[in-house]
Image: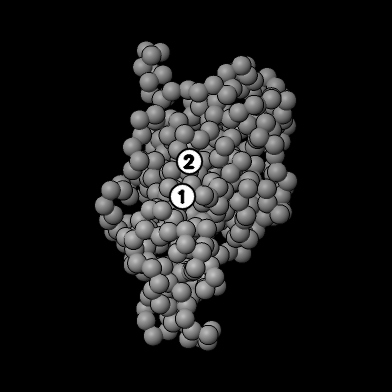
Amino acid sequence: MWWLLVNWWETVSYFSIPFEFVMVGSKIGFDLYVNSSTHDVREHFVRIFPAGQVLTVSDLTIFRQKYYQLYVSETQRDSYLASLSSNTNLTETKKTEVIKESAIKYLSTLFDAKKQFTTELLHDTISGCRESIESMVHVIKGKDISDVQKLIGDLSFHDFYTYDHSINVAMYSMALFQAAKGNASKSEIVTAGLGGLLHDLGKLKISTKIINNPDKLTDQDFSIIKKHPSYGKELFQQNGIVMSGIDLSIIERIIYEHHENFNGTGYPNQIVGENIHLMARVTAIADFFDAITTKRSYHEVLSTEDALAIMANSASKKIDPELFTLFTSRVKNLVLNGKNHFCVKDDFDPCQPHRVLPVEKVPPNKQEHKLFEKENNFGSVKSDIDQNKKKAA
Ligand SMILES: [Fe+2]
Ligand SMILES: [Fe+2]
C-alpha cells in the first residue's frame, strides 16, 4: 500500500491511503492530497481537504467518484497513524497491517545498505518506529498472548526475516510487559515495544547473507552474529541520540542484553538472572516464542503447545522462569500434549531463521520447569508479578 512518491521539485513526499482509512464525522488530523499529474515522472500533489476539518460521508463519496487515490504527506504520518486507533470502521488486522508497513518502511531505510548510516538517519528511524509503536499500544492493550499470536498470524509477511521478526517481537514484548507490570505507563509499554522492534539493530552491520541464512551457520559466521548486541549498543552510544519521553538507555540495554541467558550462559557478558534488565528478559521470551511459532516459508513451525513445552525446558536456563509462567498464563485454551520431552540447546539463537528447528530430546526427569503441573491455571489472568511477590512475602 505504501507507494512512496517523491515530488521531484519539492522535498516533501507522499504516501497513498485507501478511502476507507479516512474517518468521516470527526475532525481529521492530516491534510488529504491527490496527484493531479498524468505523468508518472512528474507527480504533482494538490491538497483537497485540510487537517482540522470534519469530513462528511458525501465529501468522501465525491472523492471516490473523482479521484483514483488519496495521499497524505510524510510529514503528517504520525497524525495518520494516531487516527487509526479511533477508526471504528477498520478491523484490528487492517490497522495492524498499516502500522506494521509503517514500521517496515523505517526499518528498511535503516537496513538499506546503499544508504550511508548517519545520526540523523538513526534518529529518524527511531522516531518513525516510535510513531508505529505508539499506535500499536492501542491495538495490544488488554490483549492476551493468544490474541497477539492470532493477529500476527493474520498479517502478511515480508521476505526479509528480520523485519517480520522484529515487529512480532515488539508485539509480544508489549503484551508480556503490560501483563508483568499491571500499572505500566504508556511510555514504558512503548519502550518495551520499541526495544522489541530495535533489538536486532546491530544486525545492520552484518551481511544479509549471514543473517538471512536459514541453514546451520559455520562457527565463524555464528561468531559474527554474536557481535550484533555490541554493534547495536555502539550505534546508540556513538550517535548520542536523545528523545523526549523515552528512556533510550533502557532500549540500549534491551539491544545489548537480549541474548543473555537467565543462568549466565548467554552473550555478550554472561549476566545472570535479574541482573539482566526486566525488559531484556521480556524480549528474550518474545524472541524465542516468535522464532519457533511463526510460519516461515523455509522452516517447520511448532504448535503453541509444542513451543511452550520446549520453552519450559529452557526456563531458568535461557529464560526467566517467573516471566515464562506469566507468559503461559496468557495463552488461552492450552492443551498440553506437546513436545514436553524436547528442548533447544542454550546457544539456540532465536534471531536466526532456521530451516530445521534444532530441538533435541531430553529425559522427562531432567525437566526443570514444571509447566505441566500448572495446567489448571492456564487461561487465568494473573496480576502484576511484583504484587504477587509482595503477597508471597
Ligand atoms: Fe538478536
Ligand atoms: Fe530476535
Name the residue that disc number 1 marks: 87
Say which mark, if any, is on residue 140. 2
Which quarter of the rendered picture does the C terminus lie within? top left
Extreme residue in the front direction: 58
Observer-nearest residue: 14 or 293?
A: 14
Tag 1: Cα neighbours inside 10 Å, few (<14), some, or many (≥20)?
some
Q: Position of residue 68 (x, y in %)?
A: 55, 73
Task: Specify whether 248 is left or right of 366.
Answer: left
Q: Where is residue 385 in the image (x, y as percent from the top left)?
A: 42, 24
Marks 2 and 1 sit apart, C-alpha to C-alpha, by 15 Å
State which tag comes first along the sequence, 2 or 1. Answer: 1
Observer-nearest residue: 94 or 378?
A: 94
Q: Is residue 25 above or below residue 393?
A: below
Q: What residue lies at 55% left-to-right and 52% top-to-bottom?
A: 94
Q: Can residue 293 be seen in this view?
A: yes
Q: In this view, does 122 lie above or below 346?
A: below
- Residue type, label 1: Asn
Say which mark, if any, is on residue 185. none
**Ligand 2: does it lie within 8 Å of the C-beta at label 2?**
no
Q: Where is residue 216 in the image (x, y as percent from the top left)?
A: 68, 53
SS type, badge 1: loop
Which quarter of the rendered picture does the N terminus lie within? bottom right
